[in-house]
Image (tube, helix red, strand yellow):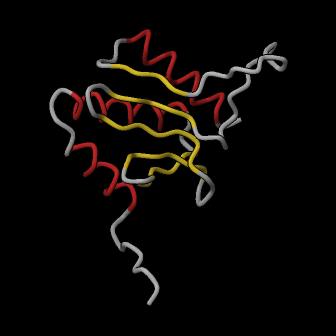
Amino acid sequence: MPAKKSTQDPTAAVLEKIASYPAPYDSVGRRLHEVILAAAPELQPRLFYGMPGYAKGKGPILCHFIAEKYIAFGLSEKANVSAPGDADDLLMPSGWFLTELDDATEKKIAAIVRRAVE
């Protein structure tokens, strides 16, 4: 018998997951969700292996995050991780850890997300 697909709204499922994070990561996760969507409004949230993920429509997940001892924000292999001038670089950044969001970190994450969807 095939697995049943969830009928829950994907955005609601992501927000519910974020709300389940322990404090202070629930509020950091909500803000990170907002930063991601403001940086790339074309992204659609949906759960990705049980964590908030963001994709262009029904396409592959490009970025995601999870909260445990900290928040781990990452890019999938489908995201654009290259930056101008690093075509010869064999080691590309694809994951970051954070415990809070300040203005500078929000700007960096927004830039990473904008690059990821190019």
Q: Nearer the viewer, residue 113 or 37?
A: 113
Quick one: quadrant of the N terminus? bottom left
Quick one: quadrant of the C terminus? top right
> Where 98 sits versus 64, above or below?
above
> Where 92 sits versus 26, above or below?
above
Q: Is residue 45 left or right of residue 87?
A: left
Residue 28 falls in image quadrant:
top left
Q: Is residue 56 left or right of residue 28?
A: right
Residue 78 screen position, x and y as percent: 67, 43
Q: Residue furthest right?
A: 88
Q: Nearer the viewer, residue 110 or 20?
A: 20
Q: Nearer the viewer, residue 25 or 11?
A: 25
Residue at image location 52% in from the left, 26% down from the top: 95
Residue 102 falls in image quadrant:
top left
Q: Is residue 51 left or right of residue 99?
A: right
Residue at image location 29% in from the left, 18% down from the top: 100
Residue 53 screen position, x and y as percent: 46, 46
Q: Residue furthest left?
A: 23
Residue 84 screen position, x and y as percent: 79, 16
Residue at image location 68% in from the left, 28% down from the top: 81
Number of callouts: 0
Residue 112 screen position, x and y as percent: 58, 24
Residue at image location 43% in from the left, 14% down from the top: 105
